[in-house]
Amino acid sequence: MMPAFLVTGAAGFIGSHSVEWLLKQGKRVVGVDNLRTGHLENLATARTSPNFEWVLADAGDEVAMRALFKQHHFAGALHLAALVSVPESFDDTALNARLNLVVADNLGRLCVEFGCKRLVFASSAAVYGMAAALPNQESAAPQPQSPYAAAKLAAEVMLLGYAASFGLEALCLRYFNVYGPRQDPASPYSGVLSIFTSRFQRNLPVIIYGDGEQTRDFVSVRDVARANGEALLGADVGSGRYNVSTGRPVSLNQVLTIYREMFAGAPAAQYAEARIGDIRHSLGDPSLLRDMLHFEADIPFGLGLRELALEVSG
Ligand code: UD1
């Protein structure tokens, strides 16, 4: 039987795209999700594949996960299941610690126990904090400024500790601002591009917090899915922490210019006071992942944004 790969958080935004990428490579995938923040509809395409097995389970349910590891002898695991909202990590610190640290630790230990050689872990640019020099390089001392960032960093440390101790291959991918189809626009703290897209499509004004000159390193979910997949499948890739970023800054005012080309009659943007704690500029140095995995994000921002805005509106 062909070896299988485990994907946790499979029904999420990044998870569902990652599953599809792996299936396209002809791999067998077991996708786990508890549907706390994921949506089963995200897996509609994946579920038509005979190489995909859907499992409704909590990645933190050790009994369920142990049974899956025993049954499948996974060739690799992609751990995306998480508490994804930074504000929620302030409101429920215990849940954050469990979902973002304890579950990752459990999975790391299951990988060691069952000989699953490689674990790719969804970390975040949030671990750098706001004071770090730009562009963020993996060698910088992390300065987490939220329970969310702290737990992601702690999970990196645990997994890299298992890598050093037991020979697990642990790749911690620090995603920058991921955007694309299936990102949930429901909360004010959802990704800015999912919010803007949904508002432009409904002909509602968008709100820009601050002067719009803040910049982000926006990376398409399709590139992120490929980074995840290549990190999982690549030969001779070493354990470590890797930025998943483009290295190209885009300001919110530049973002608006692109939307205006697509939605010419849209109402003017409203400018409001900057958010407390908002980062002025965020930018990742993509060179380490390029050197190690020959990975480069290759979807130009304008193209990715057009695809998002036009695809979702049908
Ligand atoms: C992102 C992450 C966050 C992480 C942080 C630091 C997301 C969704 N959030 O926050 O988890 O802690 O990086 O690495 O990826 N904005 C508007 N109008 C809106 C919504 C947002 O102007 O309607 C602005 C924000 O004030 C911010 C920018 O857009 O300046 C981006 O916001 P957002 O998408 O929430 O991401 P980050 O703040 O970068």
Image (cartoon, rainbow, N blue to C red):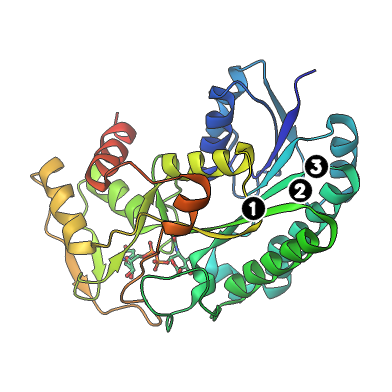
Mark 3 is on which residue type?
A: Cys
Element marked by disc 1: loop
- Left or right, 167 with respect to 38, comes to right
Tag 1–tag 2 contact (CB < 8 Å): no
Q: Is residue 108 above or below residue 143?
A: above
Element marked by disc 3: loop
Q: For the point 60% across and 39% down, which residue is it?
A: 234
Tell me the crowding category of disc 2: few under 14, some 14 to 19, or many 20 or more residues within 10 angstroms, Cα based.
Answer: many
Q: Provide the residue designation for mark 2.
A: 59
Image coordinates for residue 79, horizontal then vertical, percent: 67, 49
Q: Provide the residue designation for mark 1.
A: 238
Image coordinates for residue 291, horizontal then vertical, percent: 47, 52
Ligand 1 near label 3 (Cβ, under 8 Å)? no
Image coordinates for residue 300, horizontal then vertical, percent: 27, 44
Mark 1 is on which residue type?
A: Gly
Q: Is residue 117 above or below residue 95?
A: above
- Closer-to-camera residue (186/136): 136
Tell me the crowding category of disc 3: few under 14, some 14 to 19, or many 20 or more residues within 10 angstroms, Cα based.
Answer: many
Nearer to us of marks 3 and 2 is 3
Q: Is residue 274 above or below residue 30?
A: below
